[in-house]
Amino acid sequence: MKIAMIGGTGDQGIGLAVRFVKAGESVIIGSRDIKKAENTVDLIKNMLDGDEARNVIGMTSEEAAAEGDIALLTVPLQAQMVTLRNVKDHLENKILIDATVSLDGCIGGSPTRYIEVWQGSAAERSAEFLKDKNVKVVSAFNNISAASLLNIGEEVECDCLISGDDAEAKKEVITLAEKIPGVKAIDCGPLENARIVEKITPLLINLNIRNKIKLAGIRITGL
Ligand SMILES: NC(=O)c1ccc[n+]([C@@H]2O[C@H](COP(=O)([O-])OP(=O)(O)OC[C@H]3O[C@@H](n4cnc5c(N)ncnc54)[C@H](OP(=O)(O)O)[C@@H]3O)[C@@H](O)[C@H]2O)c1
């Protein structure tokens, strides 16, 4: 399975990409700028052993979306719609994993505050925009920090809370998420529950700031 990272050149995209490549998955780093994608591929290869780093290449985000079997959106809220507009035609009938968090920081405010979007959550905003292409949007990886993903010598101490309306798509995303050591993936029900899950992220950012750390995460117990 080829995973297309749309906007995969930022911290979250690189963090997820490096974990997936390390787990043996085939990853395409997508960017608006092919040179930036290629530089990110070099960065990822430098982070991994030679053998581990075979399956990562760089493309434009449009090419990556066309080439990938599954796409993962890792752009800030202010880039969400413009990015999806550019790749929409290539996502038809595919799964789009949306890691976008609707943070006030994206519009010049505080990173510890959530902002409401009309659709209820960033993931539902993607789903509304892509519904005529039968894209199965799954919200995931919103609460896992890039810092913990990039800390590749250690397991990630955070659950991956997954919301979506297509059961098969969620199963695929759960399988993918659990390839990251330490991550337990939890089916949190329909996509509308992304409204709750996305709101946890500004709380975790707040806890990082208050405790002068970078690795705050969340675990659900008792399941
Ligand atoms: N960072 C974290 O720890 C973390 C944790 C959980 C969830 N998230 C969520 O994951 C998403 C990505 O986070 P990030 O920290 O990786 O973001 P980022 O570094 O700010 O941006 C990621 C990529 O998005 C593209 N981009 C940025 N601004 C853009 C704009 N105005 N127009 C079009 N494209 C733009 C860029 O890709 P190109 O220039 O290559 O096209 C950039 O490298 C966000 O929604 C964030 O809330 C992040």
Image (cartoon, rainbow, N blue to C red):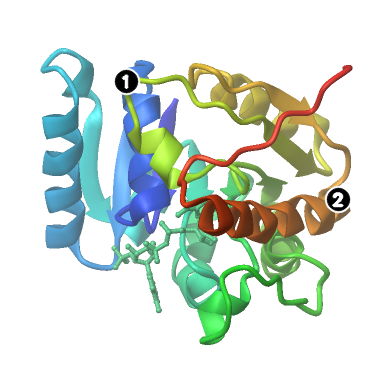
Answer whether residue 16 is visible to the viewer in this image. no
Type of amino acid at the residue the image marks with label 1: Gly
At x 17%, y 60%, the residue is 36
Q: Is residue 98 left or right of residue 4?
A: right
Q: Is mark 2 within 8 Å of ligand 1?
A: no
At x 79%, y 43%, the residue is 164
Q: Is mark 1 within 8 Å of ligand 1?
A: no
Quarter of image, res 143? top right
Query: In this figure, which residue is indicated by the disc labeled 1?
Result: 153
Label 2 environment density (alpha carbons within 10 Å; few <14, some 14–19, many ≥20): some
Which numbered disc covers residue 166? none
User: Disc 2 versus disc 1: distance between alpha carbons?
Assistant: 32 Å
Q: Which of 66/5 is in front?
A: 5
Q: Which of 168/12 is in front?
A: 12
Query: In this figure, which residue is indicated by the disc labeled 2?
Result: 193
Type of amino acid at the residue the image marks with label 2: Asn
Q: Is residue 128 left or right of residue 65?
A: right
Q: Is residue 192 left or right of residue 173?
A: right
Residue 156 at what x, y percent from top left? 50, 26
Residue 9 at what x, y percent from top left? 29, 55
Q: Residue furthest bottom?
A: 108
At x 11%, y 41%, the residue is 42
Answer whether residue 15 is visible to the viewer in this image. yes
Q: Which of 169/180 is in front?
A: 180
Circle 1 — which element?
loop
Q: Residue furthest top?
A: 51
Quarter of image, res 175? top right
